[in-house]
Amino acid sequence: MIKENIEAVVRTESGKGVARKLRAEGRLPAVLYGPRNEPVALSVNAHDFNRMLQKAKGERILFTLQLKDNGSSEERLALIKELQLHPVNDLIRHIDFYEVFMDQELHVTVPVVYVGKARGVEMEGGMLEIKRRSLNVACFPQNIPDKIEVDVTELGLGEAIHIGDVTPPEGVKVIDPERLTLVTVVSTAAAVETSEEEEEEEEALAEE
């Protein structure tokens, strides 16, 4: 996880017109909320924020927000909860920051990265079928992992790795049910059959 400092100006006005004016001035409207304090409307420098995102290259960022409010200043720790994007050009239009505290456990979603070449694929002609690409975990802010790696090298045809088989990083607890399947190796015929069933289900839902 990367740590960054960014200045955030407290704002009292809201609405589409205000947001449009902020973006025209090179600033992004934002809000900071969390479990202990009332929500605060903010704005941050768009160039600085985008530069930090590019520097992070997909890693999670723990922000120290330097709140400026009519001459007063205070610092708050926060993570990005949501980025609202323009539907056409994908430019950031609004930021939701979630305030965190180093002594308070969080529930966050972490991507799963599968590594290695499964034995059931390489030697037994099977197909790797990924069921889940993320896990819900509980940990303190300083322990949030950017990803959880799952090694599939020894996975044979017909075998599966379940959530209960995964050992998370130290200080991290997976809170999803242990019995759920993460990844499995199936025969190519079974994979085609599963794909056809999923297509039929999607078509049925579309007709409802």
Image (tube, grey):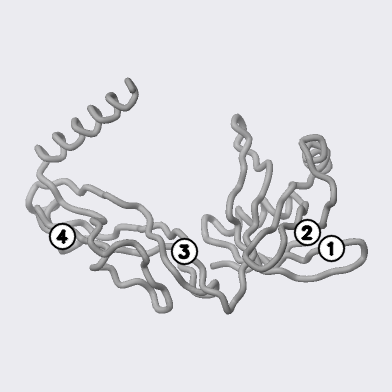
Pick whichever, 70 or 37, lies toward us.
Answer: 37
Image quarter (top left, top right, bottom left or bottom right) of the N terminus: bottom right
**x, y percentage for residue 115?**
29, 60
Question: Which label sits in the foreground, 1 or 3?
Answer: 1
Whole-angstrom CA distance, mark 3 to mark 2, is: 25 Å
N-terminal of the two: label 2 or label 1? 2
**x, y percentage for residue 154?**
15, 64
Residue position for label 4: 155
Residue position for label 3: 146
Pick whichever, 169 or 206, lies toward us.
Answer: 206
Question: Which label sits in the foreground, 1 or 4?
Answer: 1
C-beta proximity under 8 Å, tags 1 and 3: no
Q: In terms of secondary structure, where does tag 1 sit? A: strand
N-terminal of the two: label 1 or label 4? 1
Residue position for label 1: 68
- Circle 4: residue type: Leu
